[in-house]
Amino acid sequence: MRNKLAPWVPTVLSITRAVSGLVFMAHGTQKILGFPVGGHTPAMFSMPWTAGVIELICGALIAIGFLTRPAAFLSSGLMAVGYWIAHAPRDFFPVNNGGDAAILYCFLFLYLVFAGPGPLSIDGIRRRA
């Protein structure tokens, strides 16, 4: 089975990167642009606002696969810090403190730092040119 799936690994990496970037960017659009409606809009230059700016910009960069490694590195760090500041003090267990998404984003983005964006990306196109 491994031999049949192996050719798809680069494509699935690109799709995973794009989807995770778009979902991450949605957290930023909610904080900074108020869309989709339902979250809170933090005060400008506050810590949550700064996190929203990073989520918006880095999420977009990750989604299109441009400057993927630096954007993923910054996003991974943001999620690690966010987990320890916002979630861990609530409860020891991530399922109870609401930090499970932050942990998953942290490690997914850390993986992208090492794996790169995949071939279906601006970085991949620039590398081939």
Image (cartoon, rainbow, N blue to C red):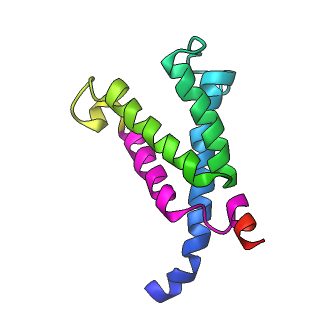
**Residue 97 percent coordinates (x, y):** 30, 29
Vertical placement of residue 83 versus 1, above or below: above
Picture quarter with the C terminus: bottom right
Q: Which residues make up the magenta segment?
A: 100-124
Prevailing secondary structure class for the magenta stretch in the rendered image: helix
Q: Tell me if I can see residue 122 in this picture.
A: yes
**Residue 114 percent coordinates (x, y):** 47, 61
Vertical placement of residue 121 versus 96, above or below: below
Query: Which is nearer the eye, 123 or 27?
Result: 123
The outermost residue toward the right is: 129
Vertical placement of residue 58 versus 11, above or below: above
Is 60 positioned to the left or the right of 1 in the image?
Answer: right
Is 89 positioned to the left or the right of 47 in the image?
Answer: left
Identified at 51% across, 81% down, the residue is 5
Q: Tell me if I can see residue 26 in this picture.
A: no
**Residue 10 percent coordinates (x, y):** 58, 72
Identified at 65% across, 50% down, the residue is 63
